[in-house]
Amino acid sequence: MRILFCCEFYYPSVGGVQEVMRHLAERLVQRGHHVTVATTRLAERDFTEHNGVHIVEFGVTGNSVRGMHGEVERYRDFVTAFDGDALMIKAAQQWTFDALWPVLDLIRVRKVFIPCGFSGLYEPSYAEYFEALPDVLRKFDHLIFYAERYRDIDFARQHHLEHHTILPNGACEIEFSVQQDKMFRRRHNIPASSFVFLTVGSVTGVKGHKEIAEAFARLRNGRRHVTLILNGNPPPAPAVVIPEPANEGAGSKESSAAGTAAKRLLGSLGRRVRRVSGLAWRSFGVIRREGWAGIRTRIYALAAAQLEAAGHINWLPGRMRKAADPIRFWVDRASGQANKQVLKINLGRQELVQAYMNADLFVFASNIEYSPLVLFETAAAGTPFLSVPVGNADEIARWTGGGVICPAPKDERGYTRAVPEQFAAEMKRLMESPAQLAELGDVARARWQQQFTWARIADRYEAILRGAQAVETEAVLPCRPDHDGCVRLQG
């Protein structure tokens, strides 16, 4: 087959969407298919092929709500002219999907779409977008969802969109087939007897690092030595390249110079407007998620950064230090307690796999997710996890048999808010339940090998792209909600 994948970002950019699309694309190439990825032009990408996958770049940013800038028409022309068998787009609310709305009827290949959660479904600014979306989704041949129950698949059911399959994420069978490195703890100065908690995610403020650090600080570990590994990479900041508009004809030197100057001025103004609008959009996003307290926190953070650079961070009162950098506040508090240590690190991929394998319990308290890859990865490592009910974490716990869910409320925008005291109590209970942890880890590893490797998942994608109208959910998931053999959730 000749297949076109469309996604906002792709390798070497890092993120969940990028990793899923890369694993699928490369495995389809290994099976003899020709795969092309249409994605954003990045300054850091100096190649047009990676592991057999062809990459075509477009200088485009934005979406239909915020506005799209750059080579939108070139992208539409490329997709409508694609001479192949299938097209697959991942994620709504981004330009590789939104830009195609006007030309979907012109695309003659099989069209598959992965909605990826509908993060803006409850946002007032996206009301018109989601009013129009059902008619757009009807123009696709097949939809793929990662969860049995979540806002995107519930939206599809509400609008009687039945042409879909539930297909979970997974973890790499190559990365997680290595042996556990017994020297990992020694390399990181972790005592052999220490109970190790691990969390992984970008340090964006919504991936639960603060909540986990606070829960760890509140953990009553007694004489037991405990270690928390807070692994986090900085928020991705891809350098998007938008080409300058081509000159439109020649004129006199004077008019040409004047036109060039005008274009430079307009270009400069346009860039400033986009920067200001982007800042305004991010600020409104903070207000929507966290209220004005979020803005105050960021003001405190700016003040703290200035004072720290000047060597006067202690001038800030404790309340402001906590608000300015809550992760650091709780890490410092935990590190000052007996028999506790915290490692704030950003491990390379191979070492991170070893962290999964050497941890005793993976802990996850993210505020918003769809279907977190990290939970599949910890299952692949044979390490049990404790998570709040974010995204479809409760389903992943049931599917893999390797997780425990700690209850946590959601706010009016759908953000999960862990209760640190309650989470700390669950951490302590599981730490003191080695038999349960061993059983959870063994079951998770076995189910991952049976169902949740990317090789197994690629089989299902290949069938859908070939034209299979349905992949039975019972064949995808190891157990159903009413199946007596399922591992039940705790808490």
Image (cartoon, rainbow, N blue to C red):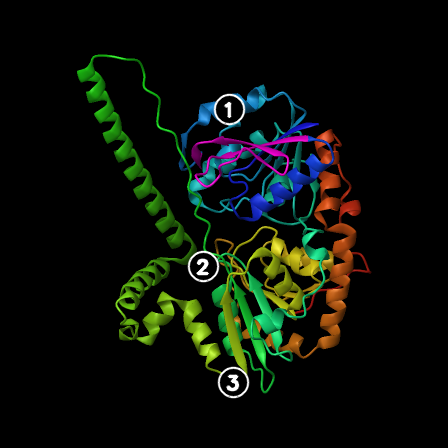
Task: Identify the residue at image location x=32%, y=19%.
Answer: 247
Residue identified by numbered label 2: 205
Which residue type carries mark 3? Ala
User: Picture coordinates of residue 89 (x, y %)?
Assistant: 59, 34
- The quarter of the picture where the C terminus appears is bottom right
Residue drawn at 72 percent across, 76 percent down: 434
Q: Which residue is at a point 28% across and 31% down the rendered structure image?
A: 267
- Seen in the picture, residue 195 relative to 199 is either above or below; the reply is below
- Residue under the point 41% across and 58% down: 290
Q: Which mark is residue 338?
A: 3
Mark 3 or mark 2, which is nearer the start of the sequence? 2
Disc 3 crowd, CA 10 A, few/some/many (<14, 14-19, 20+):
few
Describe residue 417's horizontal placement relative to residue 385 as left or right: left
- The reply to whether the magenta stretch includes residue 141 is no
Magenta run includes residue 37: yes
Amino acid type at mark 2: Gly
Q: Dot 2 surroundings within 10 Å: few (below 14), some, or many (20 or more)?
A: some
Q: Give the range drawn in magenta.
A: 34-63
Q: Residues under labels 2 and 3: Cα distance?
A: 27 Å
Mark 2 vs mark 3: give the one in front. Answer: 3
Does 40 sit above or below residue 329? above
